[in-house]
Image (spheres, rainbow, N blue to C red):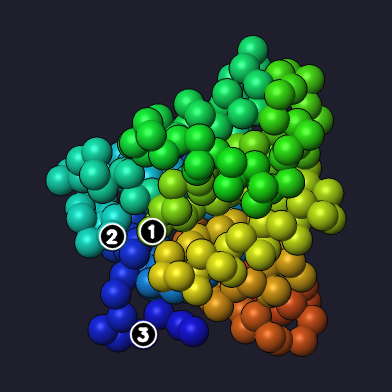
Amino acid sequence: MTAREGAELRLEGRGLVRTFRGGAGLRGVDLTVARGEIHAIVGLNGAGKTTLMRVLLGMLRPDHGEVLVDGVGLRSADASTWARVGQLVEQPLAYAELTARGNLEIAALLHGIERGRIDERVDLAIEEFDLAKYAPVRTSRLSLGNRQRVGLAAALLHEPAVIVLDEPTNALDPAGVILLRESLLRRAAAGAGILVSSHHLDEVARVADRITVINDGRAIGSLAPDGVDLERAFFDLVLSDDAARSSA
């Protein structure tokens, strides 16, 4: 599936500009994520992927442009809007002194889940990310990979309609990657719109409906998830863009 004209958009950024000292930032990015779509963004380190996600989530204010989250502009977004969003950008939400289960219970409260349903939702999240034997363990004692699983479970346990994940496979072992893949595909099939960044092109191709390449704070082209030699196609786009900017 691709985002098509008239499709319900779960997330939309229009003409996003955010400039930092030194010139880095976003330079007029347009991006959409449709209902039921997994849209991946890829780029080299420093290309602007995390900045874009932070702007889309209201963590950074754009200098210019507009963001709509499930049809609601950021300036009008209230608690009910953000209750439909699940995100993991940079570091997972994890309190070191709490157990894995305790972290998930806190996440459920923050996402507005009714107290009478918290245990049920937490149990489902623990099962989904295979965390049963780690549930009573303090987060500070977990491996990086299992902390990442806790962070992903916390971001997704309220079944959000809009999902934004920055490098979610970081630190995950192969089993964790498969669990995440199945989780995202299930949620997209249920109607969620998912934006995910990654530098693992092969893994992205297994789940993405669209792949957008980000370079120097701009969307410079797309890759076909079912294309041949994605890595070469990616570097061809980036090198061509770099050459065009150098000669301009």
Dots 1, 3 in contact, CB < 8 A = no
Q: CA distance from mark 3 to mark 2?
A: 16 Å
Which of the two discs, 3 and 2, sits closer to the camera?
Answer: 2
Q: Nearer the viewer, residue 225 or 246?
A: 225
| Residue at 26 percent of width and 47 percent of height | 81
Res. 65 visible in picture: no
Q: Residue furthest toward the left?
A: 76
| Mark closer to the chain start, 3 or 2 | 3
Q: Is residue 137 above or below residue 145?
A: above
Q: Secondary structure at mark 2?
A: loop
User: Can you identify the residue that label 1 sits on?
Assistant: 161
Check residue 4 in the rendering and tell me which mark sits there, or answer none.
Answer: 3
Callout 3: helix, strand or loop? loop
148 in relation to 43, above or below: above
Label 1 to label 2, Cα distance in Å? 8 Å
Looking at the rendered structure, the kind of residue marked 3 is Arg
- Residue named by callout 2: 70
Q: Residue furthest top?
A: 97
Q: Amino acid at mark 1?
A: Ala
Of residues 9 and 134, the one drawn nearer to the viewer in this rendering = 134
Instruction: Say if mark 3 contacts mark 2, CB within 8 Å.
Output: no
Cα separation, mark 1 vs mark 3, equals 18 Å
Could you say where residue 91 lies in the image, as x and y percent from the top left? 60, 33
Residue 67: name its quadrant.
bottom left
Which amino acid, mark 2?
Answer: Asp
